[in-house]
Amino acid sequence: MLKVLILLGSQSDLVITEKGQEILREFKIPYELRIASAHRSPALVEELLQNFEKQGGKVVICVAGMSAHLAGVVASQTNLPVLAVPVANAATAGLDALLSMSQMPAGIPVATMTLGKAGFTNGALFAIQIIGTNDKELTEELVRYRKTQATEVMASDNKNRVIFKG
């Protein structure tokens, strides 16, 4: 059973999903990644979402830039958690997408992550946290993941620490 549906507004958004997809695979979270535009292929967006819901899907992650309406359109059609990841562009550095995703009207919630690769990585982890609310083993794996992150930071500090005593 698929647990996460990843919708990209454009093929150019693929590059920011690599690390997050790696994390979903590391946690053995079944997912499907599709390219579907809220503006250019709205019927496909609706079809993908309906099929995902019928399969018992849990979380939708939407990645889009520019006007970035994908997450809002999806959120208006489902009661599943919708996570939004804005993509930066040259003209506005992603501010347009970030504002579009985060300025949702009351009653249609979208959880907006930060821009780009870090945003999609956080989106993947947030999806895992949502799924983990009903899965104790998954929650324990997340705890181990966080401990590993802390260990890596301490190792980096030990390797790169500088103390100058003038």
Image (spheres, rainbow, N blue to C red):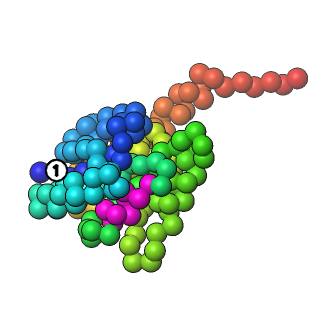
Q: What stretch is highlighted in magenta?
A: 68-75
> In the rendered structure, does residue 152 fall within the stretch colored magenta?
no
Mark 1 surroundings within 10 Å by alpha-carbon count, few (fewer than 14), some (14 through 19), many (20 or more): some
Q: Can residue 127 be seen in this view?
A: no
Q: What residue does disc 1 label?
A: 2
Tell me the chief SS of the magenta region.
Answer: helix
Residue 28 location (% of width, % of height): 21, 41
Residue 30 left/right relative to 147 = left
Q: Position of residue 152 (x, y in %)?
A: 48, 31
Hey, which residue is sitting farthest right in the picture? 166
Question: Where in the figure is residue 48, as x and y percent of width and height?
Answer: 19, 54
Q: Which of 119 and 163 is in front in this view?
A: 119
Residue 74 pos. (x, y %): 31, 62
Tell me what residue is drawn at x 60 percent, y 43 percent.
91
Q: Residue at x 41, y 49 (%)?
A: 64
In which quarter of the view is residue 59 placed? bottom left
Q: Is mark 1 on a helix, strand or loop?
A: loop
Residue at (56% x, 27% y) in the render: 156
Q: In the picture provided, is 53 more to the left or to the right than 23? A: left
User: Is residue 74 a member of the stretch shown in magenta?
Assistant: yes
Residue 94 visible in this rendered orientation of the protein: yes
**How many marks overall?**
1
